[in-house]
Image (cartoon, grey):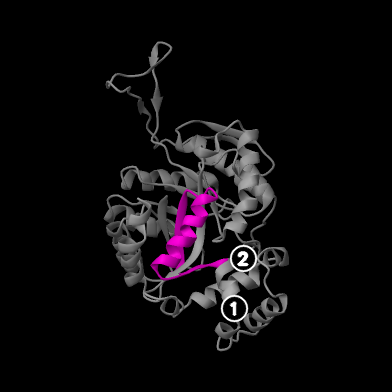
Amino acid sequence: MRIGIEFVPDKPIEKILKWTKLAEEAGFDNVWITDHYNNRNVWATLTALALNTEKIILGPGVTNPFHISPALTASAAVTINELSKGRAVIGMGAGDKVTLNALGIKWDKPVSAVVESIKYMQALTAGDKYKADGKVFKVKRAKLAIVKKKEVLDANGKPIMKGDKPLKKAPKIPIYAGAQGPMMLNRTAQVADGILINASHPKDFDLAMEKIKEGAEKAGRDIKEIDITAYASFSIGETREKALEGDAKIVVAFIVAGSPDVVLERHDLDMDACNKVRALLGEGNFKDLPGAITDEMIDAFAVVGNKDQCIKRIEELEKVGVTQFVVGSPIGPKKSDAIKQIGKEIIPHFK
């Protein structure tokens, strides 16, 4: 089980860098930086991290194909890969319709946009030419001049031949899809190296795994090729009560309010209680909001507790097929302490 961590660049980059260095020291495998136009730029943040870390894999979690061209995203990722000496990944999702429309950006055919953008970026990051007449992207010709292919060597250090010429490849940059709905899960499982799923409960992954398997089989892929990632709201403390201090309940409130009824019903949540949360959030009543969050809501939409409680849930996710667990906001009442605690008490359990 790989363990990743998410940071939102709403704080100064120096602070994001401090936390990322702590995460690297603690043994985290990946750091994912969220991409929202109203925060610090994701690629500028990743540049700082690439230049000041040594081992941790890093990338946007996630960007989208609408606010900038996938060609520009591919170029940015190749640059980060160069600066980090081969540690870049890309997370690509559909983006938020409301936010994009507010910016005057048309949000259309999201599933096709994500699938086509992944193929587009795979070609460009591999140093290949790309052209397409897709539903979303009409590309006449695209190629990155900065990608350099190198000879592929066998176990004895000799070039592998393709016909009468040495086989050459560019450094691989894994591309993950941010996916939630059945169609997005199915179609991205046909092309992506990994799938990032905003969920923290095995019930949500039971359904997701069916669609991922269907997509993988359709493409003739082994599901083991796909890094299935739980992108979870998380908070750890010495006790569950301590873990719930800070913003954990507020984060859960936003998830409850934004979830369709079918998801709330899947977790057998009281709909009156959920509607109360929606109403309080709609009013901006953050004073009474934490008191409206039930234990059942927390269990459905977050991983919260002491080390044993957190380990138990991650193990449950591993059993249903999750191969990477991402520690998402709020992480803990005090981020630095939580990162250290995870490194000491959680990560060793899964290595």
Residue 282: x and y in percent read 66, 81
Residue at (61, 47) in percent of width and height: 209
Mark nearer the N terminus (1 vs 2)? 2
Residue 85: x and y in percent read 31, 43
| Residue 217 falls left or right of residue 79 | right
Q: Is residue 156 above or below residue 65?
A: above
Q: Is residue 339 above or below residue 183?
A: below
Magenta region: 301-330
Residue at (61, 83) in percent of width and height: 292
Q: Name the residue carrying label 1.
A: 294
Of badges 1 and 2, the one in the foreground is: 1
Q: Name the residue carrying label 2.
A: 99
Q: Quadrant of residue 13?
A: bottom left
Kind of residue at disc 1: Thr
Secondary structure under the numbered disc 2 in the rendered image: helix
Q: Is residue 15 above or below residue 70?
A: below
Residue 133: x and y in percent read 66, 35
